[in-house]
Image (cartoon, helix red, strand yellow):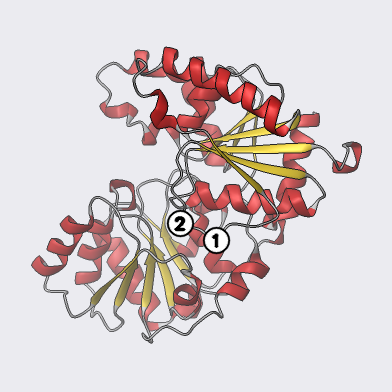
Amino acid sequence: MSAILSKKDKIVLSINSLQGAGAERFVLTIGAAFHQLGFDVHVLTFNSKVEFTLNENLTYHLIDYERYRWLPKGKIRNSVIARTVDQYIGKKIGHPILVLSNLERSDGIFSYSKLPNIVYVIHNTLSLYYRFSQADNLQQLKSKLIATYSKHPCVCVSAGVKEDFITQFGDITPIAAIHNPIDRYEIQKLADAFVPEYQNYIIHVGSFKEAKRHDILLKAYAQTDQSLPLLLLGQGKLQKDIEQLVTQLGLTDKVVFLGFCENPYPYIKHAKFKVLASDWEGFALVIAEALALGVPVISTDCPSGPRELLPENNLMPKADISAISKKLSQAMQDPQQFYADFDEALLPTTIAEKYLAFIQS
């Protein structure tokens, strides 16, 4: 499909920063795939923080968001930055045939952009991410989101995210579900970078934030025989709370905090199995990455993501400590019963082709 387009064409990928997890890895992976297809790829950020080794085949640009904080938050600030972005892209990059905007800061800015061919990438189940069930003024919140996401077409990273979007907002824009790209070959190479000092363990990869439900996972793990230690890889604002919970549950000898690791794949590769206990995910990138390494996975049955990657046997009810404990025990006894095949349709150039087909349609 990309043969229709000139291989000199430019693609812009926008995101707040390259510090983070799923969406940031998406930008770098899809960027490399577009480059492999022959496009001139530019990554635009609004914050200089970087936690990844950057692909030298991509060109990186920074427009410092902090310079605009003196402006009133919302429409005024976003519209001013959008004008700056449009002028910058026109002068420094040229005329992109595709702009992919990722996450809320970028989305808010590009809702005021005059550039053509902008597509929002929706990485989260929005009704859960914005806690619609707890919102004091739900209609006002929905109206604000509709005002943003009706401006340009949207690609959702899973069918579950798309279903939630349509249920909450209706038919407000062209929309498609395209899974995140998984660079299996690069992941397998990175997984051989070192051998962890730990052996025979369970791995959990994810930021210490509410959605990941480390608290539920630990309470469930405490009800098992803890025959395998649990390694927690990640960082985040709730880490101290989780460390205290580990102490309260008497698990200090069984739970290891690994912190942030730019290359988590050796830890995943050498794990007996991977566990996910989230209340919600967008796509659950870490599941697909574990499958790419041939590692068994068990996961809560989130509203989106895991069910599209794993068989029924590998799923657990979310926030159900007893059910999660039972599944953990089964996996500790026989991890291979939770092995699942990697879907080659997730390979990066295949996913990149789907984006190109979407904008041409």
Nearest to the observer: residue 131 or residue 183: 183
Q: CA distance from mark 2 to mark 1?
A: 7 Å
Residue 129, by quadrant, is top left
Residue 250 x %, y %: 11, 73
Res. 192 mark: none
Residue 126 x %, y %: 44, 32
In this rendering, would 35 be left or right of 307?
right
Nearest to the observer: residue 57 or residue 148: 57
Q: Report the amino acid beneath label 1.
A: Thr
Nearest to the observer: residue 44 or residue 92: 92
Q: Which residue matches tag 1? A: 53
Q: Report the amino acid beneath label 2.
A: Glu
In this rendering, would 87 be left or right of 191?
right
Quadrant (top left/top right/bottom left/bottom right) for the N terminus: top right
Residue at image coords 75%, 30%: 94
Q: With respect to residue 140, does 305 lie above or below?
A: below
Secondary structure of the residue carrying tag 2 is: loop
